[in-house]
């Protein structure tokens, strides 16, 4: 019997404002990031006994740091710049700590002491703004970075023998890029305005244009599945409620129905299946199937009517959110009024019901997982009405190599465990037919 866990939230809210005690003026902050001092933040959630730290950055070069889950006390750091800072992130690998913030006019600041002091690593003579970066995994003994920003600019750094340099690796496009991520080594994905999605697998020497046809979409944030060990997944969120998912490291993208037209600014996942997106006017949507379907959370969406512009995962039950009034990423007057932190704690997965009694709303076949795979993979599909179902596997020449399903199926959710013991390494296709619905997806066998 299959079971489905309903997300029922038990919630508390902790609010912290910024500024000197007794003052009404509060700095506008644009990004928050949380990390654990002792853990490997990229791969595992922090545990309750670990030391939580947060770094927040914003307008006019402000940087605040805080220790603890609820963050009741915030300390302003001296950034050494008055440039607006739009993004911050920390790399932490068993004691090797490196925090980076990027912003206007090629600004890039680096800290190795929990955000207390900062070193200027800005791109020389660059007038364009940087909106995102990621840590770049290279053969250099020192950590490097890849950044993106206005007019489609992309730079990557190198640090050999103590000599730090920047190299421009633009894909010759003029679209603003809002978010970038390094999948591994030279495999980089960037996205931004007018549906732009770009990918390189050779460190920027060549770029693949994977942009979507809808040029009204402005992508705001990319999230790699490898952060929650969903290795081949990549998620993208953007304006007008747009959510796109890739299950093959960013080569192919499919749009998912978010159920909202509000702009979505950030996304976090706590594991391979469960995640949250948030955005304008306090909208919050959640998924429990890896981003394939999204649901409204009326309670969490009612906690604030401000724009939620940044999320950071505290632990499996808690997300800290940065909110502002009237967010406009294309204006220098970002945010405006009060900025505060909203900490939402929940106890998910507290109710269980039989999934066999839940009727799907649409025909759907999901990307197999894992992919690539050896020796087995799982293919899930859903049927809203009783239909005759066939599910077959083909090689690249169109030859049928396996029949996985060939029978009448009642409405419901199903999965097939496919073992590829008789297949050699290579690319294969699996095709499902359910009544008039038919869909084909690609999978890779690696042996």
Image: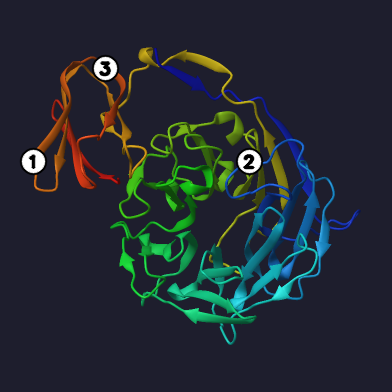
Give residue 411's mark: 3
- Residue hosting label 1: 399
> Which structural element holds mark 2?
loop
The C terminus lies in quadrant: top left
- Closer to the camera in the image, 247 or 72: 247
Look at discs 2 and 1 and give the one toward the viewer. Answer: 1
Q: Earlier in the sequence, mark 2 or mark 1?
A: 2
Disc 2/disc 1 C-alpha distance (Å): 44 Å
Residue 297 picture quarter? top right
Q: Position of residue 277 (x, y in %)?
A: 52, 43
Q: Confirm or deny contact between disc 1 and disc 3 (CB under 8 A).
A: no
Give residue 383's mark: none
Disc 1/disc 3 C-alpha distance (Å): 30 Å
- Residue hosting label 2: 45
Look at discs 2 and 3 and give the one toward the viewer. Answer: 2
Residue 434 in the image: above or below residue 328? above
Q: Position of residue 55 (x, y in %)?
A: 72, 56
Q: Position of residue 149 (x, y in %)?
A: 50, 71
Disc 2/disc 3 C-alpha distance (Å): 37 Å
Q: Earlier in the sequence, mark 1 or mark 3?
A: 1
Residue 91 in the figure: left or right of residue 136: right
> Which structural element holds mark 1?
loop
Residue 138 in the image: above or below residue 281? below
Q: Earlier in the sequence, mark 2 or mark 3?
A: 2
For disc 3, the neighbor class at 10 Å (few under 14, some 14 to 19, many from 20) is: some
Q: Position of residue 255 (x, y in %)?
A: 34, 45
> Which structural element holds mark 3?
loop
């Amino acid at each position: 019997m299959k079971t489905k866990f309903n997300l029922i939230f038990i919630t508390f809210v902790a609010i912290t404002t910024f500024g000197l005690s007794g003052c009404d003026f509060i700095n506008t902050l644009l990004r928050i990031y949380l990390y654990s001092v002792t853990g490997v933040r990229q791969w595992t959630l922090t545990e309750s006994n670990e030391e939580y730290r947060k770094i927040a950055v914003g307008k006019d070069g402000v940087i605040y740091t805080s220790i603890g889950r609820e963050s009741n006390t915030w300390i302003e750091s001296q950034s050494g710049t008055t440039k607006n800072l739009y993004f911050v992130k920390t790399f932490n690998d068993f004691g090797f700590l490196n925090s980076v913030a990027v912003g206007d006019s090629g600004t890039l600041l680096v800290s190795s002491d929990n955000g207390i002091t900062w070193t200027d690593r800005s791109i020389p003579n660059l007038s364009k703004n940087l909106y995102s970066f990621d840590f770049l995994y290279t053969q250099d003994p020192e950590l490097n970075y890849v950044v993106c920003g206005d007019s489609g600019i992309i730079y990557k750094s190198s640090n050999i023998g103590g000599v730090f340099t920047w190299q421009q690796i633009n894909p010759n496009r003029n679209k603003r890029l809002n978010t970038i991520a390094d999948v591994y080594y030279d495999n980089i994905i960037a996205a931004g305005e007018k549906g732009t999605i770009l990918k390189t697998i050779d460190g920027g020497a060549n770029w693949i244009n994977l942009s979507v046809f809808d040029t009204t979409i402005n992508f705001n944030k990319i999230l790699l599945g490898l952060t929650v060990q969903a290795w081949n997944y990549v998620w993208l969120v953007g304006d007008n409620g747009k959510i796109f998912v890739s299950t093959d490291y960013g080569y192919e993208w499919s749009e998912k129905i978010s159920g909202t037209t509000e702009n979505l600014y950030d996304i976090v996942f706590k594991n391979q299946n469960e995640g949250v997106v948030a955005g304008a006017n306090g909208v919050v949507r959640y998924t429990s199937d890896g981003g394939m379907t999204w649901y409204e959370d009326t309670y969490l969406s009612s906690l604030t009517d401000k724009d939620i512009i940044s999320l950071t995962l505290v632990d499996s039950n808690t997300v800290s959110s940065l909110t502002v009034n009237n967010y406009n990423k294309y204006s220098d007057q970002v945010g405006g009024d009060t900025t505060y932190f909203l900490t939402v704690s929940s106890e998910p997965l507290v109710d269980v019901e039989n999934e066999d009694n839940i009727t799907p709303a649409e025909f759907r076949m999901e990307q197999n997982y894992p992919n690539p795979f050896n020796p087995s993979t799982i293919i899930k599909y859903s049927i809203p009405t009783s239909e005759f179902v066939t599910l077959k596997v083909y090689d690249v020449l169109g030859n049928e190599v396996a029949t996985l399903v060939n029978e009448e199926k009642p409405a419901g959710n199903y999965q097939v465990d496919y073992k590829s013991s008789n297949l050699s390494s290579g690319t294969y296709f699996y095709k499902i037919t359910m009544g008039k619905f038919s869909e084909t997806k690609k999978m890779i066998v690696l042996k």
